Structures are given as C-alpha cells and as structure tokens.
Amino acid sequence: NAGVMQNPRHLVRRRGQEARLRCSPMKGHSHVYWYRQLPEEGLKFMVYLQKENIIDESGMPKERFSAEFPKEGPSILRIQQVVRGDSAAYFCASSPTRADTQYFGPGTRLTVL
Amino acid sequence: AQSVTQLDSQVPVFEEAPVELRCNYSSSVSVYLFWYVQYPNQGLQLLLKYLSGSTLVESINGFEAEFNKSQTSFHLRKPSVHISDTAEYFCAVSEDSGGSNYKLTFGKGTLLTVNP
C-alpha cells in the first residue's frame, strides 16, 4: 500500500507566480490535512478537507491560499501571487476517518525567489 | 489554544548511550499526545501516541514516552540509541474537545544525532 504521495518534492517560483502543490492520500483515506513548516518552526495546521468539502480552513491565510479535494484526483493546495514569506515546507497528511492517525507525505519544499 | 515546547533543538549523543527528548505542552482541555520522527528527505512517521489508559507508551523500535499530566510533559526516552536513530523528532498534541481532535499542533522539533 503506497504511502501519501506529494509532488513536486521541490518547487521554485518567482514572486508573483502561482504555486500548485499536489497530494495523493493513501488508498482508502478520504480525509486530507495540509500543514506548513516555516524555517525554524514546527508544523502548523492549515486546512482539513474531506472529499469535495472543506471541513476546517482556520489555519489558512485569508488571501492567496486555497485548497480543494475533488471527487477524483489529488488534493491541491494553491498559492497565488507567491511572496518570499511563502517559502516553506508544505506537508500533506491523510487518514481513513476523522479521528484516526494521520499519515504524512514527504512534503513539498517551496522556494520563492 | 494548545501549544508544544520542545526544549532542545539539537541533542548529540554517542551510540549505545541513553537519550531523553523533552516535550511540554499547554492546553486547557484533555489532550492526545504524539511523537513523530522524520528521517532525511522523508515524511513524518508516527513513532508512538498516547490517547488514554496507561501513561507509558512504547514503540516497536525501543522508544518509550510517559504522559505526566501534573507536569504537562510527554518526554521521549530510549535506553540505548543506534546510529540509525539519527533523525528529527517532533512532539505533537491535539485537543480532545469540540470535535477538533484532528488538528495537530507540533513543537519545533529536536534533531537527534547519534555519533559512533
């Protein structure tokens, strides 16, 4: 059973461009969570999605960030008009139910030039 | 809101020595506690967790952690470390309240380096 897949593993963008980060949960998992790890910080919760629904986006910045988890395909974290402060590692996790253990992917390291 | 403090950002030890990685948390409600490990270029893997019951929990590779409610701590210990234990270790907490127990709050991590 493949683990949580994230791609790309590394992404470089210039200021003002868009970044799209993809997350494929483990087979049988319909709950997806995104976390962000800024340099020298712990992981911070961003958003929790279940198929086609955003359950909790309390950790998402109010502007430029959006997330989706369509019926088919991976979950997408989208960052519009990136700024240098968006440089971080973005981790996705999945679980089979809401209260279950979260399994993490390897992360996408975003660098904004 | 809950918070997690990992007091040591780096812990260097020699192989076969004992190690303790410290974790303290702050919360106004009951919590679940976790230790995750991240090997280089890999995702976080769950090492062990405390949900309820016995306050001493163990992992399959010799680590253990003890939940101490009075000291709000969940320190990770191993009596004898191996080179392969070199990794970053993250303590995390979620609150058992209001249906938001999925929301993990992490510490900044402790880099354990085991030297020969």
Image (tube, helix red, strand yellow):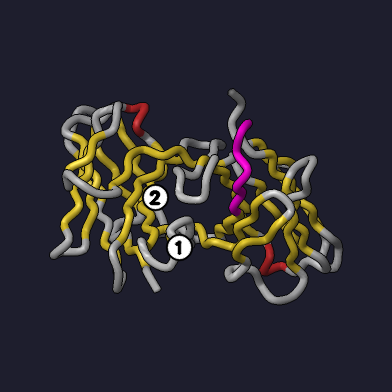
Q: Residue at x 70, y 57 (%)?
A: A53
Q: Is residue B26 above or below residue A32?
A: below
**Residue reaching furthest bottom?**
A62
**Residue reaching furthest left?**
B70
Q: Residue at x 34, y 32 (%)?
A: B85
Amino acid type, mark 1:
Gly
Provide the chain ID for the residue under circle 2. B
The crowding category of the residue bearing disc 1, from other C-alpha atoms within 10 Å (few below 14, some 14 to 19, many at least 20), is: few
Question: What residue does disc 2 label?
Answer: B90
**Quadrant in which the C terminus of chain B appears:** top left
Q: Is residue B98 above or below residue B81?
A: below
Q: Which mark is residue A43?
A: none
Q: Is residue A104 above or below residue A50?
A: above
Q: Is residue A104 left or right of residue A22?
A: left
Q: Is residue B55 left or right of residue B11?
A: left
Q: Nearer the viewer, residue B90 or B58?
A: B58
Locate residue A30, reporting x and y percent. 63, 43
Locate residue A27, reporting x and y percent. 63, 31
Amino acid type, mark 2:
Phe
**Residue A72 is inside the magenta segment:** no
Q: Is residue A40 above or below residue A28?
A: below
Q: Dot 1 lies on which element?
A: loop
Q: Which residues are magenta?
A: A27-33
Instruction: Choose top left, top right, bottom left or bottom right for residue B20.
Output: top left
Locate residue B69, reporting x and y percent. 17, 61
Instruction: Choose top left, top right, bottom left or bottom right for residue A16.
Output: bottom right
